[in-house]
Image (cartoon, rainbow, N blue to C red):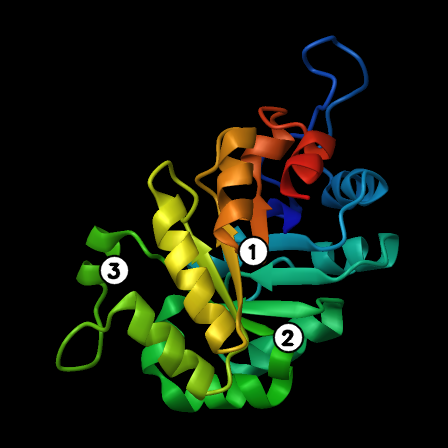
Amino acid sequence: MDVIPAIDLAGGRSRVVFWPGVASGVGAPTDRPERIVERFVGLGARVVHLVDVDGARAGAPANLEAVGRIAATVAVPLQIAGGLEAADHVRLAFAAGATRVVLAMAVIDEPEVLRDCLEVAGDWLAVGIDPRPERFAAFPWRRPSPPTLEGLIGELAHRGVRRLVLSHGGGPDAGGVAARLAELARQHDVDLLVAGGVADLDGVRRLRDAGVSGLILGEALLSGAIDYPAALKAAA
């Protein structure tokens, strides 16, 4: 299982300051995303996840200059989420240096938009899903009745989506859900990534054992709550 560092971009900077030596007072803090990414790549990161916080609020990409700086600094795939709501947004993200894109859950009920984005991104496109029962049920679905998570995986796979990102999918009770969905994803040849909800190495191992393809970790890594090399070892 991949452990993918995540950085929330706001105003061209990391929303969370990175200071790996804070406990011992060694080193210096930084909110420059290119320096943070460079550090994680040096520790073994094979993919980096970037969340355009401003873009998510505006409904259009807003931190592409920062993405460009990161792409010029490291040579690993960059996965971008936030503010990508149209095929032109995907094109702009790729032009800035992104390698993969994550569309918001709303695109599921916008088949023409999803189709256009797939034509641009192909297998490098993912769809984000919030699997929390209350959020999933309350989502404003544009269909007679809400879908099930299981049914949604099959539906999106049929439409050509090959990667899914479950936000808030790594909580203490997520192991069984993740295992069930990961098995279903494998049946449809879909990669299942889980973002957030993991607070310790036991959580990393739980998702590894469930069979998910990747775990996206942001503040837990940036704050030092989870040591990245230790997380990589736990995920192996």
Q: Secondary structure at mark 3?
A: helix
Task: Give the number of the mark in front: 3 or 1.
Answer: 3
Name the N-terminal-most of marks 1 and 2.
1
Tag 2 residue: 124
Looking at the picture, which amino acid does disc 1 mark? Asp
Q: Considering the numbered disc 2 on the image, is that residue within a helix, a strand or a loop? A: helix
Q: Which residue is the site of mark 1?
A: 52
Q: Is residue 41 left or right of residue 198?
A: right
Residues 155 and 55: in front is: 155
Q: Residue furthest top?
A: 24
Q: Residue at x 67, y 28 (%)?
A: 227
Q: Earlier in the sequence, mark 3 or mark 1?
A: 1
Please tell me which residue is depicted at 43% across the width and 87% down the height of the picture. Answer: 158
Q: Amino acid at mark 2?
A: Trp
The three-letter code of the residue at mark 3 reads: Phe
Quadrant in the rendering for residue 102: bottom right
Q: Relative to 228, does residue 78 appear above or below in the rendering? A: below
The residue labelled by disc 3 is 136
- Badge 3, how many Cα within 10 Å: few under 14, some, many 20+? some
Which is more N-terminal, label 3 or label 2?
A: 2
Residue 95 horizontal/vertical position (percent)? 74, 74
Residue closer to the observer: 19 or 88:
19
Specify the quadrant of the image occupied by residue 170. Answer: top left
For disc 2, the neighbor class at 10 Å (few under 14, some 14 to 19, many from 20) is: some
Can residue 58 be seen?
no
Residue 77 x %, y %: 75, 62
Disc number placed over residue 188 in the picture, else none: none
Decide which of 14, 101 is in the foreground and name it.
101
Report if the CB atoms under discs 2 and 3 are less than 8 Å apart.
no
